[in-house]
Image: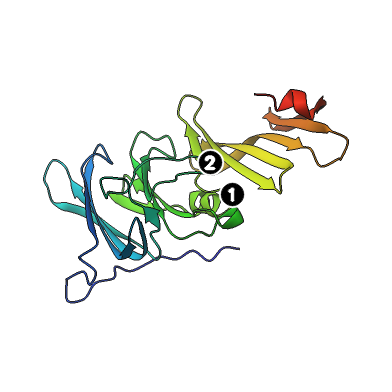
Amino acid sequence: MMNYRFLLPFMLLGTIVWGQNHFELKDASRNYDVSIDVQNCEKDECSGKAVIDLRDKKTSNIFQTLTSEDLNFYLKEDQKPTVNIIQLYDEQSPLIFNDFNFDGTEDIAIRNGNESSYGGPSYDVYVFNSTKKRFVMSEELTSLAYENLGMFQTDSERKRIVTYAKSGCCWHLTTEYAVVPKKGLVKVYELEEDAMGGDETVKVTKRELKNNKWVAKSTKYPIKEYYKE
């Protein structure tokens, strides 16, 4: 079981110690201007403890302050971090704003180290709580962002969360979850691609939850045919 970290801001007498590594982001979110203060920056890479201030675009007041133990990211040519990019095996931004639970409100994922599969980026995922009027950490969504290949993706049209996993070069698993109100995440689909048999084929198994029952179908394909560009 993962030990989730609910972190305190890293402040000293109301002043951020590492203020020289400060970034302002105006276009990351539709609702908030963002400021980041991170502990270490060297050349084009930043890492370490960080404080993220979300400032309401309408009032310019600080809406909420969140933190990360290790906000690891690279800088673009303009010496600013990317935002809202999720590329499998490639760039994954330090901050990702999206509606992760499909309730119509903006949520935020914050990079926290490299603790997902194969040393990939891991994220603390916060959803907006309409009762508390603030972001609260989602243990379910944070777990997905630690246990798979980096940050999950969302399909807003189908209201699905999509994760990716692998074992070595030849076994891959794509999993889809539905978000059920008052129940949480429900796994509804899996695509398993298994090319570990050593016979130049890949066994593709699709599993889908239909009427509360899993339906599975497997098909074998020649590797060269299945993975052709």
Classify mark 1: residues with Cα within 10 Å, few (<14), some (14-19) or many (20+).
Answer: many
Mark 1 residue type: Asn
Side of 62 where 130 appears, left or right:
right
Q: Is residue 203 above or below residue 229?
A: below
Q: Where is residue 63 in the image (x, y as percent from the top left)?
A: 21, 52
Q: What element carries label 1?
A: loop
Quarter of the image that includes the N terminus: bottom right
User: Disc 1 or 2, which lies upstream in sequence?
Assistant: 2
Q: Quadrant of residue 9?
A: bottom left
Find the distance from the CA under tag 1 to the CA under tag 2.
Answer: 11 Å
Q: In this view, does 131 lie to the left or right of 17?
A: right
Q: Where is residue 30 in the image (x, y as percent from the top left)?
A: 25, 36
Q: Name the residue under label 2.
A: 88
Residue 146 location, quadrant: bottom right
What amino acid does circle 2 point to? Answer: Leu
Mark toward the viewer: 1 or 2: 2
Q: Look at 38% across and 38% down and name the residue there.
A: 98
Q: Mark 1 points at which residue?
A: 148
Q: Residue 49 in the image: x percent, y percent?
A: 35, 67
Q: Are marks 1 and 2 in contact (CB under 8 Å)?
A: no
Element at label 2? loop
Relative placement, left or right, of 216 versus 156 is right
In the image shown, does 189 or 109 lie closer to the viewer? 109
